[in-house]
């Protein structure tokens, strides 16, 4: 019995990555009558904002003095609603080649194919996985009492929390969880931190006030049963001791992998994709890269920068998607045609 291969989905633009930059690209492309489909390996939109720090405050989004990763994602989804973008979540683009008519044919690992006039790579730093501490049996505690990210702060409310690490993530969550945890201990292998100096000062002030503990040492063994942690053995300069805790947050960094993008024939530099700063186009015409995955002189890895890149990329993509069609620059504040697209009354 022969199986029938489904026809490929045809679209103006295929965006790889549904984080903030990919979502805002939908808005900028939509203003120029460019229809989008998005593919993301995660099972939800928002990228790292939703996956790693949905409840962590972000302070450098214009006009939003404070917004969480999930709130920013929700606002972007509301903003792009008029453009009817289609999402394909939990899938990864595994292959790409150019068709004779100039379009790109892409296929996911599940066999879904796309035909797109332009491709926008907005995949952050690529696919990412947390680095697992070398502790025997840690897998049996994961997602029950050992977590590599804070997705719901209430999971740590009134708990005895042990955070391990010396970078921004460890310090940020120390400061955010201390007010709601029953007890909180921050452990690092040395009394020197890589995080923001202000965060280090705040953490040390909490220690001085007796509101949390700072421990210099390394975890050696986990103790518990049925996925429930109750303590951790720790090696310090004074010897071995046991820390009572029922929540462990190890922040040992992320392993970033570029994935199949590395095999698409694009010029790469240290696992990043070089682009120009006029079009944000890669070495392959019609393939653009925005956000943390690209590199150029003066690059800043900020969401704000990715939004700027999305706007300029869209202007360049218009020439490919609508060749010969004159593009008149317009402002949403004064253009009735743009306001109509946005459903503004």
Image: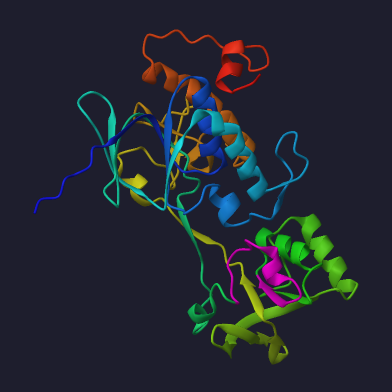
Q: Residue furthest left?
A: 1
Q: Which residues are magenta?
A: 145-164
Residue 88 on the magenta segment: no
Front residue of this view, candidates 235 and 224: 224
Image height check: is 129 above or below 90?
below
Taking depth in this image into account, of 75 and 276 the one nearest to the observer is: 75
Which residue is located at x 56 percent, y 56 percent? Answer: 51
| Residue at x 41%, y 53% (from the top left corner) | 90
Residue 103 sits above or below residue 225 on the image: above
Decide: is 165 above or below 59: below
Q: How is the image coloured?
A: rainbow
Disc tally is: 0
Residue 232 x %, y %: 64, 86
Q: Residue at x 65, y 69 (%)?
A: 165
Is 156 positioned to the left or the right of 264 in the image?
right
Question: Can the viewer see residue 297 in this picture?
Answer: no
Looking at the image, the residue that sits furthest to the right is 209
Q: Position of residue 278 (x, y in %)?
A: 50, 22
Q: In the figure, is residue 41 to the left or right of 75?
A: left
The quarter holding residue 223 reads bottom right
Q: Position of residue 297 (x, y in %)?
A: 54, 33
Q: Is residue 239 left or right of residue 221?
A: right
């Amino acid at each position: 019995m022969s199986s029938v291969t489904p026809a490929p989905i045809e679209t103006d633009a295929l965006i790889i990555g549904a984080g903030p930059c990919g979502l805002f690209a939908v808005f900028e492309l939509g203003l120029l009558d460019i229809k989008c489909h998005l593919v993301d390996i995660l099972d939800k939109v928002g990228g790292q904002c939703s996956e790693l720090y949905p409840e962590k405050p972000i302070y450098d989004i214009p006009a939003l003095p404070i917004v969480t990763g999930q709130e920013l994602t929700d606002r972007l989804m509301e903003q792009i609603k008029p453009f009817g973008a289609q999402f394909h979540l939990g899938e990864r683009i595994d292959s790409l080649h150019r068709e004779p008519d100039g379009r790109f044919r892409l296929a996911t690992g599940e066999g879904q194919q796309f035909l797109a006039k332009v491709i926008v790579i907005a995949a952050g730093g690529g696919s990412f996985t947390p680095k697992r501490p070398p502790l025997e049996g840690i897998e049996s505690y994961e997602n029950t009492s050992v977590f590599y990210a804070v997705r719901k702060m209430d999971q740590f409310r009134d708990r005895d929390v042990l955070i391990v690490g010396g970078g921004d993530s460890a310090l940020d969550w120390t400061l955010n969880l201390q007010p709601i945890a029953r007890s909180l201990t921050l452990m690092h292998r040395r009394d020197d931190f890589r995080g923001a100096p202000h965060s280090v000062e705040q953490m040390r002030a909490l220690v001085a006030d007796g509101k949390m503990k700072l421990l210099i040492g390394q975890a050696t063994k986990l103790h518990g049963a049925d996925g429930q942690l109750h303590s951790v053995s720790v090696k310090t300069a004074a010897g071995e001791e046991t820390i009572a805790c029922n929540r462990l947050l190890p922040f040992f960094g992320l392993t970033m992998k570029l994935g199949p993008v590395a095999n698409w024939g694009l010029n790469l530099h240290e696992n990043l994709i070089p682009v120009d700063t006029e079009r944000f186009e890669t070495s392959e015409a019609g393939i653009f890269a925005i956000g943390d995955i690209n590199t150029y002189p003066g690059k800043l890895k900020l969401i704000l920068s990715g939004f700027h890149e999305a706007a300029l990329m869209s202007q360049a993509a218009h020439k490919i998607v609508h060749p010969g069609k004159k593009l008149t620059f317009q402002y949403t504040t004064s253009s009735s045609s743009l306001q109509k697209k946005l459903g503004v009354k």
